[in-house]
Amino acid sequence: MTSLSDPSAPARPFDVHGGSERPRKTYPEVPAATAIGWLRQMYLIREFETRCMQSYQDKKIGGFCHVYIGQEAVAVGCTAAVQHADPIVTAYRDHGHALARGMSARACMAEMFGKVGGCAKGKGGSMHMFDRANNLFGGHGIVGAQIPLGVGLAFAAKYEDEVIKGGRSSRVALAFLGDGALNQGAFHEAMNLAGLLDIPCVVICENNGYSMGTHIARGTTMAHRLGVKGAAYGIDSYEVDGMDVLAVYHEMHEICETARRTSRPAFVDMRCYRFKGHSMSDPRKYRGREEEEHWEADDPIQRLRTHLQSRGELTEDSWKQMVKEVRAEVRESVEWSEASPAPSREELMRDVFMERWGPYTGSSQPEMLGGAENVPSFEAIDPSKARTPGELA
């Protein structure tokens, strides 16, 4: 693990993570088509979040809205570094992870709009993107709540592989959290279990330097060297440049494959920066415009675009065509979401319990998985056939 500056030393003006910046590494090249695909994914997330901000201001999106602008390389690089069968769970800044994992812009935007065509049928909203088909087990609104779930997902996968199937543990789980969640008891209890029971969960702290309006050094000990949080539980810890998708992919691939091979957990201090506030209601008065411009000049999308163009793998015309196509895709997702109906009163009685109980009609798949249109209506349910709490138990 990289040695960082003394904690008593003052941070440099734009060193929001509290330690000296690491020198940039060079990494093996990936196929041009792969890198261009990552560029498109990152730009899709950026454009999607921009439209979400506009829709929020137009009062088409309600509740909380936490955008991912600036951190796109983290979700895209981490997702590319693992296998599709590897489960992922994240916090409430989750739109980017959902899109990177394969959710359609339609299903994601409709959920933002609270419409029945959304991934959770409009009943979860911004903080609860869930895509079982792509092994994305949700964004979670309670700070730190997803970390034990990530460890549990890894434990379940290991138990299935080793005990039920009698083989070797072959999957890892990714659990994302913000730096503000490091002080939650759930983080420490989950890390302790992961280290104690050899659970292959990679815990990724998206360290953007600030929690909810607070610089990390004001609320977290050892802010300059977060790896000690993992080391305290006997877990290997790493630092990764989260502003470079190539760095994220290569380093995370090595970390995750080590966790897969050894069936051991890992902790990652993913150093990045969010260009916008904590949420749409955040005026960002706790940091200066000069700092923001410093980091925006290191935009992960622009960094990869420049890299590809310098190698002759992306032309200016190709880039413009990509921008045009992505904008059209996101614009169409907004139009489709506006046309999608809100959940009906009958729909609100579904997904409260897994099975029928009293007026509750059990659970059903969302439209994106092809199940919503085959669900019986509330009126078609015979209450006399509903199961009682005792029967459910």
Image: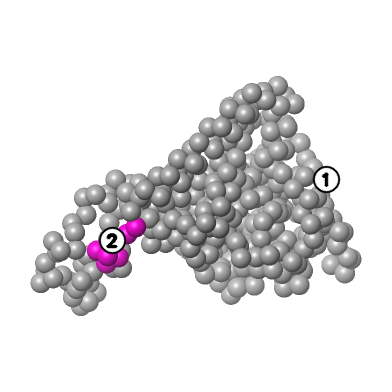
From what the image shows, is residue 220 above or below residue 224? below
Residue 146 spot, x, y in % from top left:
51, 64
Taking the spot 79% from the left edge, 42% from the top edge, the residue there is 24
Answer whether residue 345 is magenta in the image. yes
Answer whether residue 298 is magenta in the image. no
Q: In this rendered view, identify the residue nearer to me: 120 or 153.
A: 120
The outermost residue toward the front is 58
Magenta residues, start to end: 342-350
Q: Quadrant of the C terminus?
A: bottom left
Taking the spot 72% from the left edge, 73% from the top edge, the residue there is 219
Residue 381 spot, x, y in % from top left:
14, 64
Report helix, strand or loop for mark 1.
loop
| Residue behind mark 2 | 344
Colour scheme of the rendered structure? one colour
Q: In this rendered view, identify the residue nearer to me: 272 or 59.
A: 59
Can residue 30 be seen here? yes
The outermost residue toward the bottom is 390
Q: In this rendered view, identify the residue nearer to me: 278 or 351.
A: 278
CB atoms at circles 2 and 1 under 8 Å apart?
no
Relative placement, left or right, of 36 versus 118 is: right
- The amino acid type found where label 2 is placed reads Ser
Q: Mark 2 Cα within 10 Å, few/some/many (few <14, many 20+)?
A: few
Q: Main secondary structure of the magenta part?
A: loop
Taking the spot 69% from the left edge, 53% from the top edge, the residue there is 275
Among the 4 quarters of the image, the one containing residue 277: bottom right
**Mark pair 2, 1: CA separation:** 55 Å
Q: Nearer the viewer, mark 2 or mark 1?
A: 2
